[in-house]
Image (cartoon, rainbow, N blue to C red):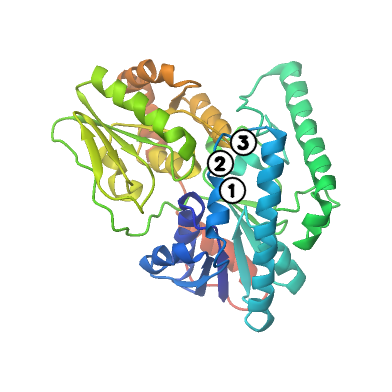
Amino acid sequence: MRIDLAAPPFSGHLHPVLGIARLLAQDHEVRVLTMPSAMPSVSAAGLNGIPVLSGWESQLTAIINTPKAVRSNPLRMYSQLTQALEIQQHLRLELETLYENDRPDLLIADFTLIAAGHLADARGIPWWTSMPSPCVLEAGDGPPAYVGGLTPQPGLLGHVRDRLGAVSIRCFKLALGAIIQKRLRKIGVESIYRSDGSESAYSNTKILALGSPAIEFRHRWPTYVHWLPFPLYTPPLPVAPPPFVSGRRHILVTLGTHLKFAKDDVARSVRQLATELRDCEFHFSDGDVTRTGLVTEGNFTRLAFVDYQRHISRYDLVVHHGGAGIMHHTLNAGLPAVVYPVDYDQFDHAARLQYAGLAIRIGHLRELYPAVQRALSDAIMHKRCDAYAGSDREDCGSALRGEINKLQSAKGPAIES
């Protein structure tokens, strides 16, 4: 089969898609569609890339790296969404040209690339959604996402709370959809929801839910949601390894590749924490491969980038923001975490980790010191993390091959496992 995968150039979205693409490339002709700045990562992964949206990178970066947290501020959300839709419109135009004479058998699109899926629909191309944050899907039971990181609450009160939260989110999306209806139609979206109630931003044929339902609060999922173990992959990058000191405990602190507005504040807090916990080495990652060098002050080091896949197992504790990528790298390494969510779905990830006893969630940097002390000494949490990392989970390649076989069965013989 010819399979295209599309993702924005940011690590949290691109790297899982590259992981999926590498697995598919063992049996199929695969192309990765992303922005020009990510082409070196695509090539380093041994994959063929098609650059899209050349000239739009600075605009997209400005949308993502907001000067303040967006959270549920309606004005910030509206501004961010309208700017993003302009880029989505240009993406659709480029894909229309590309697919006029060079169409794939399947398109797998990151959940943020709404225009890609709807263009595939218009061209009669099967498309799936890659979903690194399954908790944001609306359908099903349990606490809704995007309302501050709710955890399950038993009884009638909890049920009413969850239903009211779900209804309020749906009403908000419907209202916002009505306001931006003309912009949505330019990318091929007629309405926020389909007639069956599903969210039109995502495929209703197959959503590849990346992660494990074991830490999710929901028990019922739409039939088109199929779980894949999170594809933990980082392409080889030209960055120096972190400086590890023999015989010392090491703590990684990262806010991923976004959230630039929060990084200096967090770095200052970690630098102060390092003066109080002198028996530990603290590594703060800026998540920016374009930067060079490092800054070391005693047992505090600020680095440009830390390659999770190659180095995370050498840490004793991870302090992170609740991004999907670092969350699953930490879980896979069997490490405890302190989670400081800042924006978007990070609050929901933090809630799940804390509820499962795999992390400590904090809401303010003044809580960092006691949380780190507790996480380092909590033997029960360490055992839970080890057990989660060692639990039997399906191989991502096998699970993905099974989903491809289902699609291929109508076209020809299945692939041998």
Q: Are marks 2 and 1 in contact (CB under 8 Å)?
A: yes
Q: Residues within 10 Å of mark 1 (few under 14, many from 20)?
A: some
Q: Which residue is painted at 71% across and 20% down in the image?
A: 158
x, y (%) of residue 153?
Answer: 66, 20
Residue on which disc 3 sits = 70
Foreground residue, 44 or 108?
A: 44
Q: Which residue is painted at 64% across and 41% down in the image?
A: 136
- Above or below residue 66? Residue 228 is below
Residue type pointed to by label 2: Thr
Q: Which residue is painted at 65% across and 33% down in the image?
A: 146
Q: Can I make out residue 229 in this image?
A: no
Q: Are marks 2 and 3 in contact (CB under 8 Å)?
A: yes
- Above or below residue 193? Residue 152 is above
Q: Would residue 243 appear left or right of 236 to someone viewing this image?
A: left
Q: Can I make out residue 172 in this image?
A: yes
Image quarter for residue 242?
top left
* Disc on res. 63: 1
* Disc on res. 66: 2
Secondary structure type for disc 3? loop
- Above or below residue 60? Residue 251 is above
Secondary structure type for disc 1? helix
Q: Residues within 10 Å of mark 3 (few under 14, many from 20)?
A: some
x, y (%) of residue 208?
Answer: 59, 54
- Above or below residue 417? Residue 213 is above
